[in-house]
Amino acid sequence: MSLAELRWLDATAQADLVRQGLVTPLELLDAAIARIEEHNGDLNAVVSTRFEQARSDAASTTEGPFQGVPMLLKDFLAHWAGDPVHGGMRLLRDRDWRASENSHLATRLRAAGFVFCGRTNTPELATSLTTEPLAHGATHNPWDLTRSPGGSSGGSAAAVAAGLVPVAHGNDMAGSIRVPASACGVVGLKPSRGRNSLGPQYGDHWGSVTHEHVLTRSVRDTAAVLDATAGAAAGDPHSAPPPARPFRLEAETDPGPLRIGFRTEAPGTGETAHPDCVTAVENTARLLESLGHHVAPAAAPALDAPGLFDAMPPVLAAAVAWELDSWSERLGEQLSPSVLEPMNAMLCEAGRQVTAVQWLSAITASQRWARGVAALWEDELDILLTPTLPAPPGKLGELSPEAAPPEQLSAGIAMLGAFTAPYNITGQPAISLPLHWNADGLPIGLQFAAARNREDVLLRLAGQLERAAPWSGRRPPE
């Protein structure tokens, strides 16, 4: 099979070729390395490589559902001992900081047969929804190199969209899997809280808003990777109940008629999304009706309650201050906020003023808000459909670290996460699917949210939509 043919196969198809003896893990890896070397100069999606270690891993990979399939890890969490960890920070880049242990998620991905061939670009400390860190420079969107790939898993999304690898790791604190999935035209699932472990280094991360998973080109890959990684580890503070059957089977199962609401007004502001995003939602609603679902506008007023937007600023600020202090401890020196980009320095300074009482008050307020939102799925809905992003992918530079005063940047980034951030607070699963492209050829992702722990419902619907309106033939321009 030619390199060109391998490029656009999903991970499931690549693993099938290995099982059939039609290709070896080393051949898959060498093809991925060739693609990275050819295209990364334009994309800047991959910021560190481990090609020689990967070749050794590929030669010794003998089992797992994804035996020999190459993948990339985001340069934030998912540590692999001995590999670089920069988290988008210039300080860690300059010191060539390397992980001392494996995360549970990386260990499970490796046990599933994946071969790690590098790490992908991310904004500093993953605090932005565009990927333009001063440490490594901007990642470019494969659909238009002048556009942002989203963030904070923008390097991973760009790599998958451009066919460098079929799967890349991401994490999601306010939309950081779903936003770049939307901007780059790939599949991005944020699982339920506790579905994937953050251990052994973390239990909660940023006040329990952090969720780990991957970006893929197909729903079946998203589901099958979750089968390989899901499950609590010893000591985890959160866990999701085991699924009744494999998620991969759910993605192949007809969902039956569902109650699906849709809205195009951004939570908290009431502002209507860009006309391209509204069109995408309306077209998708019609598609859902044609598939037999009960579809209607949903006011979902609980999403607009003020608790979330009052609680998030102190939580985020305290998280950034904690991140810097954590690195101070690891490096054995007290780091000043001045080592950070301007917005993160501002957040760090603010975070150091947040008291324990204010932190707990913010957590309590966000949990109260989450109860109100979650009730929508108990009484009114099976699925809520919205745009993933409030607008098409923006131009690179508009929200870069030095483009505007820190307060202005922070506000602009918050607006990008208006549709996605709520589900990091509630812990519900939500997925972005590439179901629409605008007149400029830019992807417009659609977000679907289900009740807590109901990835089964979400994946059944996602699989049905992929079969009804397949996107696998859509590829970025060369």
Image (cartoon, rainbow, N blue to C red):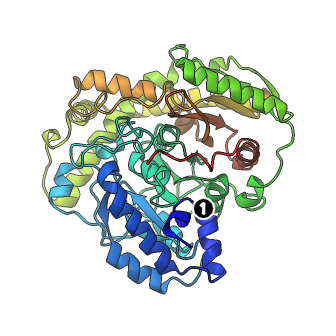
Q: In what element is the residue under mark 1? A: helix
Q: Position of residue 370 (x, y in %)?
A: 59, 31
Q: Is residue 234 visible?
A: no
Q: Is residue 282 left or right of residue 34?
A: right
Q: Position of residue 273 (x, y in %)?
A: 54, 19
- The residue singled out by tag 1 in the image is 225
Quadrant of the rendered image containing residue 74: bottom left
Q: Residues within 10 Å of mark 1 (few under 14, many from 20)?
A: many
Could you tell me the amino acid type at mark 1?
Val
Q: Position of residue 140 (x, y in %)?
A: 35, 43
Q: Is residue 222 left or right of residue 443?
A: right
Q: Is residue 202 visible?
A: yes
- Residue at 57% over, 26% down: 369
- Residue at 65% over, 36% down: 448
- Count numbered badges in the picture: 1
Q: Is residue 136 left or right of residue 26?
A: left
Q: Position of residue 243 (x, y in %)?
A: 73, 57
Please name whichever residue, 24 or 83, is drawn nearer the observer in this view of the structure: 24
Can you say whether 24 is above or below 374 in the image?
Answer: below
State which quarter of the image contains the N terminus. Answer: bottom right
- Residue at 58% over, 41% down: 427
Please name whichever residue, 162 or 74, is drawn nearer the observer in this view of the structure: 162
Q: Is residue 69 left or right of residue 379?
A: left
